[in-house]
Amino acid sequence: MGAPRVLLLGAPGAGKGTQSRRLVEEFGVEHVTTGDALRANKDMETEYGTPREFMEAGDLVPDPVVNEIVEAALSEADGFVLDGYPRNESQVEYLDGITDLDAVLYLAVAESELIARLTGRRVCEDCGANYHVEFNPPEEPGVCDECGGDLYQRDDDTEAVARDRIETYRESTEPVIEYFREKGTLVEIDGEQTPDEVWTDVHEAVAERADP
Ligand code: AP5
Ligand code: MG
Ligand code: ZN
């Protein structure tokens, strides 16, 4: 018994954050996301420098920094949806040593779609909800439907940084997808459908694998 432990994999802009929010609502799990945690601590001094330096270059923040964030968050969570981690093979090994997973989902989106999704994204500064100026617009431009907060554009959603992030993904994170595919646990979901259609598939995949 217990809430499901879900890993959500996908490229930058694949829809991990969008679908994670729905998993949180539906299954009562914690949203454990290294991206949000790092954005909230961008100027934290570490022995490697600040997260900001890596994030604004589209690079990965050093493993020890993110491993520590994830270990602390998972130790407090019953069920969770893990979003944005693991992003390389060493993070996969670390994760394997700290938890089991009930479902590993991969949101598949062609690279050609990602730049448009990233550069048009807007995020609520109060509740973190994601919108898109064209594909998923709020009712009133610049205002969050859910809480009325102001929407902003992420620093790393410029076209240049988005391209660097996709490059980093290709080099470091695609091997992670391959690892789970070879292990036989990867559930591939068509992430190019509408957000509601993607959710139908995500929900089904998690419900099937969660304890009754
Ligand atoms: P992070 O915040 O994790 O960014 P990311 O992986 O690049 O993913 P995104 O948040 O950009 O995309 P998403 O999949 O959540 O998409 P969303 O749902 O918003 O990481 C940022 C940085 O932090 C990294 O570059 C790195 O520096 C650092 N970092 C983080 N984790 C790390 C780790 N483990 N190790 C080292 N460094 C780490 O959707 C995107 C847009 O598309 C939105 O506008 C949305 O409205 C729209 N959209 C969503 N679904 C659909 C759909 N079905 N159809 C059309 N549009 C859609
Ligand atoms: Mg995200
Ligand atoms: Zn909001």
Image (spheres, grey):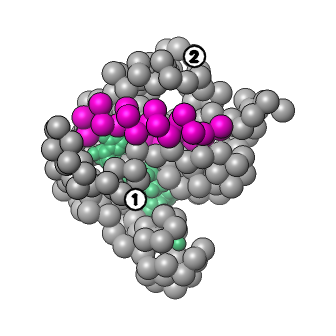
Q: Quadrant of residue 146?
A: bottom right
Residue 207 shows in this picture: yes
Quadrant where the N terminus is found in the figure: top right
At horizontal 23% and vertical 59% (from top left) the residue drawn is 159
Q: Quadrant of residue 173?
A: top left
Tell which circle, 1 or 2, labels the residue nearer the N-terminal end: 1
Residue at mark 2 = 184
User: Percent from the top left, x then y, of residue 171?
Assistant: 26, 30
Quadrant where the C terminus is found in the figure: top right
Residue at mark 1 = 117
Judge by depth and name the residue closer to the eye, 178 or 113: 178
Residue 105 shows in this picture: no
- Seen in the picture, residue 64 relative to 16 is either above or below; the reply is above
Q: Is residue 71 magenta?
A: yes
Question: Quick one: SS at disc 1?
Answer: helix
At horizontal 46% and vertical 46% (from top left) the residue drawn is 33
- Seen in the picture, residue 24 relative to 202 is either above or below; the reply is below
**How far apart in space, not on screen, are marks 1 and 2 (Cα)?**
29 Å
Number of other residues with Cα within 10 Å of mark 2, as a class: few under 14, some 14 to 19, many 20 or more: few
Residue type at mark 1? Arg
User: Percent from the top left, x then y, of residue 119?
Assistant: 32, 63
Q: How many marks?
A: 2
Which labelled disc corresponds to residue 76? none
Judge by depth and name the residue closer to the eye, 26 or 107: 26
The answer to whether residue 22 is left or right of residue 86 is right
Give the residues in magenta: 61-84
Q: Ligand 1 near label 1 (Cβ, under 8 Å)?
A: yes
